[in-house]
Image (cartoon, rainbow, N blue to C red):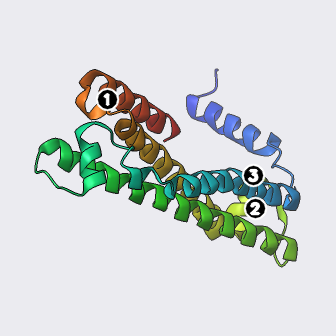
Amino acid sequence: DSPSLLSILGMTAVAALTSANPKELKDYTVEAVQFFDAMRTPASLIAAASLSVLFTEEWYKGRLTGGSFHNVLSTGILSHTNSVRLGIFLTSSYQILIFSSFLFSIATVLLATSAGIGILNGNFNPYASSAYMLLKREFEFELLSARLGFFYSLFAFIIGVTTRFLLEFDLLNKQRESIIVLFGTLSVISHLT
């Protein structure tokens, strides 16, 4: 007689459970410190880039927006056309996005530094099956906050740069070029997500 399907499944499950080697627990302290160091470096680069473009004089010179919107910024005379309203909205959005990017990236740098110091303190169980499991078990808040802060700063920076690109090259009046820029940005954000 051939064995039944249920007995075959049972034997397979028992064999899998008995022969499976549980992953060996080891000290992943060095890898955990390296993770936060690796998060701190690109977040610092985004913070520096955000800060450098946040205080450019282009806003005061009126060169950023070009075209008819150039006169609005340089003379202070407000026209009620849709182009001017959209330009003012995008200019304000750009400043908010770049400032948000700066704040999120600085917060990420501070959290990563604090977590690295906390790991060096050694007041936790360093043994785990992987570095990720160690971070998730012992430093869950720092892990989640650093990753989310970095991604939020990156997204805000990408969208802010796209907004400035649209304004700087006066693409609001060029439908084909603005669609290409917007789809390019959307594809980058979709890929990162």
Q: Earlier in the sequence, mark 2 or mark 1?
A: 2
Mark 2: give few (<14), some (14-19) or many (20+) Cα within 10 Å: many
Percent position of residue 135, x then y: 72, 62
Does residue 88 show up?
A: no
Mark identifier at residue 134: 2
Which three-letter amino acid code belongs to the residue tagged 3?
Answer: Ala
Mark 3: give few (<14), some (14-19) or many (20+) Cα within 10 Å: few
Mark identifier at residue 41: none
Q: Find disc 1 in the rendering and name its residue.
A: 178
Q: Nearer the viewer, residue 119 or 37?
A: 37
Q: What's the residue at 36%, 24% (across, down)?
A: 180
> In the figure, 44 relative to 165: above or below?
below
Report which quarter residue 117 is drawn in: bottom right
Secondary structure of the residue carrying tag 1 is: helix
| Image-based side of 184 in relation to 107, left or right | left
| Image-based side of 16 in relation to 169, left or right | right
Mark 1: give few (<14), some (14-19) or many (20+) Cα within 10 Å: some
- Cα separation, mark 3 vs mark 1, equals 35 Å
